[in-house]
Image (cartoon, rainbow, N blue to C red):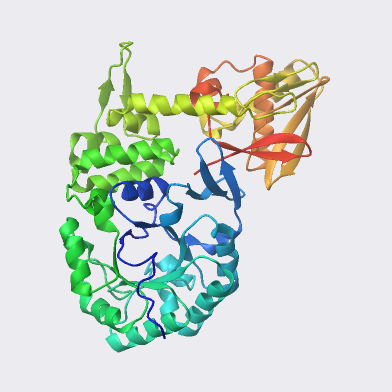
């Protein structure tokens, strides 16, 4: 077999490894900005990719893979395309190929997760469970090599027995893998167990494909430690996860390790720029803080400290924990940056008008002599009880005034639902799709009671009536000539 150690994608690289809940777009870009040369996504299960659809997000300038419920399964952008490896969770060659074909034009390479020791992966026959099925491993790799145009790598753990590990690695190599990352612990071992660096070194000397050393984060605190790990293992490249999660500037060749606050602010700016989910953003910041979660800002972030913010208007608000990006931005003195991002996003929304039947945009009211459409997004948590829901309010008002009951017309669109209410010669609706028929009916009923003046609760109006102050990310869907809006819940 010819020596393929000098593969241009995998040779002599510093790599951000895959991490569940951490390896989303902002963290990957943060790593690249701080010196990483290759970044891996968190593991994405093949089923999730297959069931998603690819959208070009013109507002964020990203490529989004979105499932039927509007959840973003995978988001990427052109900045990282040539340095991005998507890690897939699979145990089936055909599904692996189907998922890979969906993303092959948006990534630099594909990695098969063969090392995750989590029960979810093991029970599903994925991750480290694959290590006991070398025939299936070879079938998955060879199927991908035959059908997918990007390089294919694997990430594995080791067996307790070195020889058994080497036999598996040789089978991975012979199946056509372009590289292999080795986390040198068994699936039963945890970070407190020493990494078997000698196994990686012997594998590097045995195989003719790039070997990526992984698993020694507990001994890596700076750039020099990264290079020492590479020297000890004689690996083609080095991959780290937990050390980089704490501080991505560990990749910086200038050897300047940034402060935790500095690196958090860099991350937060990227999270704002690419509209990352607030809960995920908070989680990532918590991991960066580590023991500093007991600091003043850490306590504010987690909700363990009451803080009063006094803006120029002299009105104060109380923050009991950060649950949205605006609040997190305030904690890290990035309010102006947050406002500039929101302003820019609204400007882009205006440039790219979302054409409804009458040519109105997401943030305007569509109204003609027969039809009222408001940009309403229903949120049940704002209503104290079922008797206070829009349909209940509407029913009481109609009964009290002895009016004819409205007719609800509900359509299933893209596995979501849209409702239009026919009432006294007029129709009422919202452009937003909802996840269930009941929610769609409540949304349309809310439009009706708002138009009839039956709801004056500003808490509900301010939250459910979408405008410039609370614009939400959406995808357009054209159904029989009309544009509906699918809410993106990342």
Q: Quadrant of residue 208?
A: bottom left
Q: Nearer the viewer, residue 58 or 329?
A: 58
* Quarter of the image with the N terminus in it: bottom left
Q: Position of residue 57 (x, y in %)?
A: 55, 41
Q: Nearer the viewer, residue 82 or 330?
A: 82
Does residue 233 appear in this view? yes
In this picture, is 374 found above or below 220? above
Left of 172 or right of it: where is 410?
right
Q: Nearer the viewer, residue 161 or 198?
A: 198
In this picture, is 258 found above or below 88? above
Q: Nearer the viewer, residue 164 or 126?
A: 164
In this picture, is 414 found above or below 472? below
Left of 59 or right of it: where is 262?
left
Instruction: Name the residue: 39% across, 39% down.
Output: 271
Q: Position of residue 216 (x, y in %)?
A: 22, 66
Q: Quadrant of residue 375?
A: top right
Instruction: Name the residue: 26% across, 28% down.
Output: 306
Q: Position of residue 410 (x, y in %)?
A: 75, 38
Q: Position of residue 379 (x, y in %)?
A: 55, 32
Does residue 114 appear in this view? no
């Amino acid at each position: 077999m010819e020596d393929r150690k000098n593969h241009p994608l995998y040779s002599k690289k510093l790599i951000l490894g895959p991490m569940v809940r951490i390896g989303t777009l902002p963290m990957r870009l943060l790593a690249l900005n701080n010196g990483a040369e290759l970044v891996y996504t968190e593991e994405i299960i093949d089923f999730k990719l297959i069931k998603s659809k690819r959208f070009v997000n013109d507002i964020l300038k990203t490529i989004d893979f979105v499932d039927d419920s509007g959840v973003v399964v995978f988001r990427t952008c052109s900045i990282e395309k040539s340095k991005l490896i998507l890690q897939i969770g699979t145990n089936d060659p055909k599904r692996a190929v189907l998922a890979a074909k969906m993303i092959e034009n948006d990534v630099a390479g594909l990695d098969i997760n063969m090392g995750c020791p989590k029960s979810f992966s093991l029970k599903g026959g994925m991750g480290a469970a694959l290590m006991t099925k070398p025939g299936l491993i070879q079938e998955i790799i060879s199927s991908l090599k035959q059908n997918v145009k990007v390089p294919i790598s694997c990430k594995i753990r080791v067996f307790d027995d070195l020889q058994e590990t080497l036999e598996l690695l040789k089978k991975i190599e012979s199946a056509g893998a372009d590289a292999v990352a080795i986390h040198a612990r068994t699936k039963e071992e945890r970070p407190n167990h020493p990494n078997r660096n000698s196994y990686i070194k012997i594998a590097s000397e045995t195989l003719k494909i790039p070997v990526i050393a992984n698993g020694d984060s507990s001994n890596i605190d700076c750039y020099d430690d990264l290079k020492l790990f590479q020297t000890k293992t004689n690996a083609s490249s080095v991959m780290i996860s937990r050390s980089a999660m704490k501080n991505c500037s560990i990749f910086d060749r200038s050897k300047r390790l940034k402060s935790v606050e500095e690196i958090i602010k860099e991350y937060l700016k990227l999270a704002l720029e690419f509209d990352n989910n607030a809960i995920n953003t908070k989680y990532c910041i918590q991991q960066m803080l580590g023991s500093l979660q007991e600091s003043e800002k850490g306590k504010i972030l987690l909700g363990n400290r009451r803080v009063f913010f006094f803006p120029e208007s002299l009105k104060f608000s109380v923050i009991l924990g950060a649950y949205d990006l605006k609040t997190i931005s305030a904690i890290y003195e990035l309010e102006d940056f947050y406002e500039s991002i929101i302003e820019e996003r609204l400007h882009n929304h205006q440039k790219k008008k979302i054409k409804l039947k009458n040519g109105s945009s997401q943030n305007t009211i569509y109204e003609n002599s027969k039809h009222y459409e408001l940009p309403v997004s229903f949120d049940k948590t704002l209503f104290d009880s079922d008797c206070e829901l829009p349909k209940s309010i509407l029913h009481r008002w109609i009964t009290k005034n002895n009016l004819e009951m409205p007719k609800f017309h509900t359509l299933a669109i893209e596995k979501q639902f849209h409702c239009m209410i026919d009432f006294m010669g007029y129709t009422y609706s919202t452009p937003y799709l909802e996840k269930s028929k009941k929610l769609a009916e409540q949304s349309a009923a809310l439009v009706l009671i708002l138009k009839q003046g039956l709801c004056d609760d500003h808490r509900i109006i301010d939250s459910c009536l979408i405008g410039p102050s609370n614009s939400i990310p959406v995808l357009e869907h054209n159904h029989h000539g009309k544009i509906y809006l699918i809410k993106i819940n990342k």
